[in-house]
């Protein structure tokens, strides 16, 4: 195993997974309800924040870069989730606002420079809008499905970023996926709104950043976006939602997207 692979394994997988597991296990032992409600989101923030700190150091708040905004979006999603948990009547306005505000916030430097590819921010907004519509019209909520979808999107974006030579985004995406898997294994379900919005906000910011500030394959991101319909397809194929079918419909667009990213990368790989 080379030095890069070893660092990737430690900083982006083992460390965030272990940290998230410890946080979730400790909260389950304490059994203090306010902590239980935000524990998954806090575990996610600590896991991704640890990876960010190991790779880049402390993020800039006053003049955040695209990488900083990916981490800050997670924090914003966490705070918005806590707000919605206390005021559920604000759920729809907050979600719609976030679907537009986060891509615009991330893409603001590109828009200010008059870059034509700034129009690509329509894609993450469209993905967010479709996701909201699917969530509102699904037969029943499923925390397991939400966690698996977020994990697949995080892993897929990490793979796309790797072949676009955006290794920071690769590490952040893998860290989020590791934290989500820890929540799936150790955390209490159903997953609360702070964790759901934190992961969604980070994924939205990361997809926007890759589209505008990297050489990420547009085709790969479009194919990966099909994963948001995996739950609906799994229900249609079996009449009910099963984990096996959901994993199949999540794995297909994720793997295909990474393969497309590798092909589009050409003869030069990340190694």
Image (tube, rainbow, N blue to C red):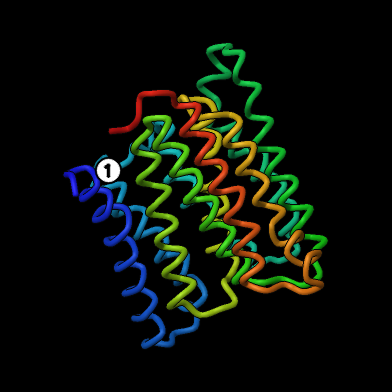
What x and y, as percent, mark residue 200?
Answer: 57, 52
87 or 194, nearer to the observer: 194
Q: Is there any visible trace of residue 79 in the rendered image?
A: no
- Where 104 sits versus 199, above or below? above
Q: On the picture, is 116 further left or further right than 109?
A: right
Query: Which residue sits at x=38%, y=54%?
Result: 175
Q: Is there any visible trace of residue 196 in the rendered image?
A: yes
Locate the C terminus and report the quarter of the image it occupies.
top left
The local secondary structure at tag 1 comes to: loop
- Where 45 sits versus 62, above or below? below
Query: Which residue sits at x=42%, y=30%?
Result: 164
- Where 51 sits versus 192, above or below? above
Q: Residue furthest left?
A: 3
Query: Which residue sits at x=64%, y=45%?
Result: 98
Q: Give the residue number, with chain letter if any, for mark 1.
A: 58
What x and y, as percent, mark residue 15?
Answer: 27, 61
Query: Which residue sits at x=64%, y=62%?
Result: 84
206 or 248, nearer to the observer: 248
What x and y, as percent, mark residue 121?
Answer: 63, 29
Q: Residues within 10 Å of mark 1 (few under 14, many from 20)?
A: few
Number of numbered discs visible in the structure rendering: 1
Q: On the picture, is 142 further left or further right than 185?
A: right
- Where 99 sits versus 34, above or below? above
For residue 191, which quarter of the picture? bottom right
């Amino acid at each position: 195993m080379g030095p890069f692979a070893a660092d990737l394994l430690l900083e982006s997988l083992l460390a965030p997974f272990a940290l998230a597991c410890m946080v979730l296990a400790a909260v389950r032992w304490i059994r203090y309800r306010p902590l239980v409600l935000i524990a998954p989101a806090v575990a996610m923030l600590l896991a991704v924040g640890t990876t960010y700190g190991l790779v880049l150091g402390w993020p800039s708040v006053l003049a955040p870069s695209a990488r900083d905004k990916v981490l800050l979006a997670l924090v914003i999603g966490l705070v918005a989730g806590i707000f919605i948990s206390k005021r559920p009547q604000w759920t729809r306005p907050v979600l719609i606002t976030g679907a537009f505000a986060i891509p615009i916030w991330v893409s603001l430097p590109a828009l200010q420079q008059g870059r034509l590819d700034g129009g690509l921010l329509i894609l993450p907004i469209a993905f967010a809008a479709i996701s909201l519509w699917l969530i509102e019209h699904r037969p029943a909520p499923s925390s397991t499905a939400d966690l698996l979808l977020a994990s697949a999107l995080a892993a897929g974006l990490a793979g796309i970023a790797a072949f676009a030579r955006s290794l920071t985004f690769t590490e952040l995406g893998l860290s989020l996926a590791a934290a989500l898997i820890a929540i799936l294994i150790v955390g209490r379900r159903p997953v609360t709104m702070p964790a759901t919005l934190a992961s969604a906000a980070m994924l939205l910011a990361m997809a926007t950043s890759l589209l505008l500030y990297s050489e990420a394959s547009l085709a790969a991101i479009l194919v990966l976006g099909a994963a948001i319909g995996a739950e609906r397809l799994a229900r249609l194929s079996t009449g009910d939602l099963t984990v096996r079918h959901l994993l199949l419909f999540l794995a297909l667009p994720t793997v295909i997207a990474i393969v497309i990213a590798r092909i589009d990368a050409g003869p030069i790989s990340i190694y």
